[in-house]
Amino acid sequence: MILPLEAIGGYDFGPFFLDLGVGAVAIVAALVFVVLLVWGASRSALVVPGLIAAAGAAFLARHAVAAVNDAVFFAQNPGYAAQALPFEGRSVWVPNPCRVAYALWGVNGARGNSFLECGLPLADRLADGTLDFFELGTEPVSRFTLRVADPACFASHQHWDVVRGFMISAPLGICVLGEPVDRSEADHILSGEQRDIPGFSDWWYVHYTLTRVSDGLVVDRFDSWGGATPYGGPPPPPEGRRPTATIAALVDRPDRTGFFEAAAQRTADLLLDHPFDQTLLRAAMGSPTQNDRADAYFFACRDDVRPLLDAGTVAAVNAGMRDTFPDGPARYPQDCRDFAREFRGGVRLDPDGRAIRLAAP
């Protein structure tokens, strides 16, 4: 009966229309019962409308019973956090990253078919050294690795584009890029399966596990359902079934407050290990992405970097910033902001005149 109703009302509206129909029939039967009772009808005449009204009420009351059952189930603490093991792998495969992102935060930021915009911060795990690579999707599986001083960070690719969140540092040419592979080789997999809620319930939830591929060992797990508190870092969600342990650390998102200030600090930190090449700054200023150009511009504004840039790089900075901030001036170096200038006295120019490195203490 539900399928024809869904054909009329749309997916997931079949049960609603079924309840609506049963409720309407029960109300009509109850009214008939009351009218017959007032008129002094015989008991036999009251049996049919009375049974219909009672059956309809019982049918609708099941939702209240199921709601109590579901609330009790979701309020339970299955001990996922206590059972969690340390993550000792170097890679992870997420077959359906958009579904996992939705399960974690309750929102799906994906546009089109781009896995990169689903909100999983695994690029940050490459940048901080937690992972060597990660894989997303199926047919094909796409493997993502950290690229350092790579002009490809600013180029458009046939299969993947560098999108927001996967550029680690534009001035240093550090980003995360993916390419299709024949099969997954990650040592861990993060996936989920739909399960029915035990007891009297017509609802379901999705159980997610982080599993070691070699032996099937479950490292951590969490559950997702409609109405669950979104994961968002500290404080942890109150429900014991939500991510609070190993998975929570793996998908921890950095604070994006003050985006450009954070980007400038990230580049300053990365400069400890990665030299800066002016050719990469020029490439960044030619990027079609506004954030890349702004990131490179603010790096060029550093008081200790600005004197080291050659005329060609200065011209590239001015050209790239011409339309980057339409609502405000971005002339170089006249309009450099204070937060960008404050990184000073910490770099030196290599003898070849191209690479800028952090000066020795």
Image: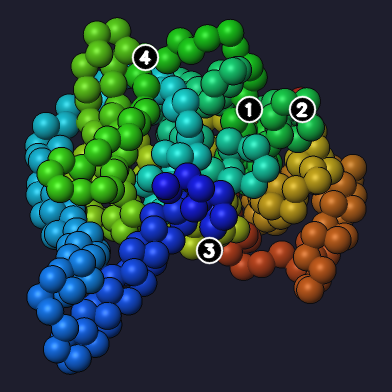
Query: Which of the two labelled residues, at mark 1 and mark 4, occupies the earlier sequence position?
Result: 1
Q: Nearer the viewer, residue 11 or 205?
A: 11
**Which residue is label 1 attached to?**
177
Amino acid type shown at disc 2: His
- Identify the secondary structure beneath mark 1: strand
Query: Which of the two labelled residues, at mark 3 and mark 2, occupies the earlier sequence position?
Result: 2
* Residue 68's disc number: none
Residue drawn at (48%, 12%), measured in percent from left and top? 184
- Identify the secondary structure beneath mark 2: loop
User: Residue 271 falls in which quadrant of the image?
Assistant: top right
Q: Report if the CB atoms under discs 2 and 1 are less than 8 Å apart.
A: yes
Give the CA distance from mark 3 to mark 2.
29 Å
Amino acid type shown at disc 1: Leu
**Which residue is label 4 attached to?**
187
Is 341 displayed left or right of 51 in the figure? right
**Which residue is label 3 attached to?**
258
Is 44 displayed left or right of 5 in the figure? left
Number of other residues with Cα within 10 Å of mark 2, as a class: few under 14, some 14 to 19, many 20 or more: few
- Identify the secondary structure beneath mark 4: loop
Give the CA distance from mark 4 to mark 2.
27 Å
| Badge nearest the viewer, 1 or 4 | 4
